[in-house]
Amino acid sequence: MAVGLAESPSRGLAPMPTLNAAKLLSRDADESQRLLQACKVYGFFYLNLETPPTGFMVKAWRDVLSFMDDYFDLPDATKMLDAHDSDITGYEPCGTSTGAKPGHVDHYESLKVSLEQCLSGVEANLPAAIAKNKELFTSFVQGAHELTLSMLSCLALAMGLPPGVNKIEAAHDTSRASTSTMSMFRYPAQTEEEARNAGGHNQHTDIGTLTFLLCQQPGLQVLSPQLNKWLDVEPRPGHAIINVGDSLRYLSDQQLFSAVHCVLPHEGRQLQHRHSIAFFLRPADDAEYTDSRGAKITAREWHNLKFDHFRASHAEQANNVILTGGMEKAGIHRAHDSSSAGQTVAA
Ligand SMILES: O=C(O)CCC(=O)C(=O)O
Ligand SMILES: [Fe+2]
């Protein structure tokens, strides 16, 4: 049975393993095995950033948050000067996609800067507000890029694939264009009136390879593959939340699990602004795989198709397997070695 939108309060916290960023950066073999199991069983895990060499990311997190406080407080008309109708760079106001409840639009605004803009080193390529903080953003994006790429090497190691040249790593060759991007989100505080038509972030699976997410406030929920019910993802200081996206599931021939998730305020409406920061690692635009419909598609085409679908009505979204990659349907929770997780899968 498919599970509907997360309209009721979720019960319980999502059980998620914790991995160590420093060990993954040094390609530790045991940590790589734990990473593989986390991606196969949950598709979501915590990443401890607090030890060197990733401690600088915790400081950058604070600095980006204080930038976001100032940026999102600007008048709408000023922020709209940064809106370029793009899904990888610039500003996007609230209400452009379908929301987390039936009949609602979303309730988050975002400011994005692409990996390519950051790597180009050319200030003129960056959104103006970001160009003023070029060092902060380039070091954050490079740090998140290096970390997520190192996770792909660790996964290849744990899967016994030839280093560097395997299908997964080869699809992330940095000399080719991609839609990898950093996105800053504000879910603004809402009045009761505002909450009647808008709320949260609709259920979805992520488009890309791995998502590196920093958040301090609750609201994120995951559809547990084990229990087939919505659970809260508890934010943890000094830890990123990492999840597998559709592209990595497809490139791994469905071995890795991209869990369905959404954002909903606990209290029924957003009482205070909620902020989150994401880096979305995605494959090179021309990388190819077979998607959830069984179609051969490039990573760029999947990205564009999925974003169009985020903007479609709930009724259209329910008609196919694009929004959640078919992951919420019973039976897709394929059997896995339950010994590794100490849990069995409710199919
Ligand atoms: O804001 C969050 O915590 C999650 C956002 C998210 O799931 C996404 O942008 O893909
Ligand atoms: Fe997401």
Image (tube, rainbow, N blue to C red):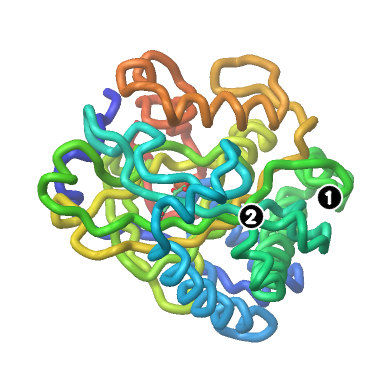
- Residue 315 showing in the rendered view: yes
Residue type (three-letter) at the residue carrying disc 1: Thr
In percent of width and height, residue 73 lies at 38, 65
Residue placed under numbered mark 1 in the picture: 174
Q: Which residue reaches farthest front?
A: 77
Image disc number at residue 139: none
Q: Quadrant of residue 248?
A: top right
At 64% from the left and 51% from the top, the residue drawn is 181
Q: Quadrant of the C terminus?
A: top left
- Of the two numbered discs 2 and 1 on the same chain, state the one appearing first in sequence: 2
Residue 164 x/y as whole percent: 87, 51
Amino acid, disc 2: Val
**Viewed as shown, does residue 249 lie left or right of 164?**
left
Q: Residue at x 58, y 49 (%)?
A: 90
Classify mark 2: residues with Cα within 10 Å, few (<14), some (14-19) or many (20+).
many
Compared with 272, 88 (above or below) is: above
Cβ of disc 1 within 8 Å of ligand 1?
A: no
Residue 224 seen in render: no
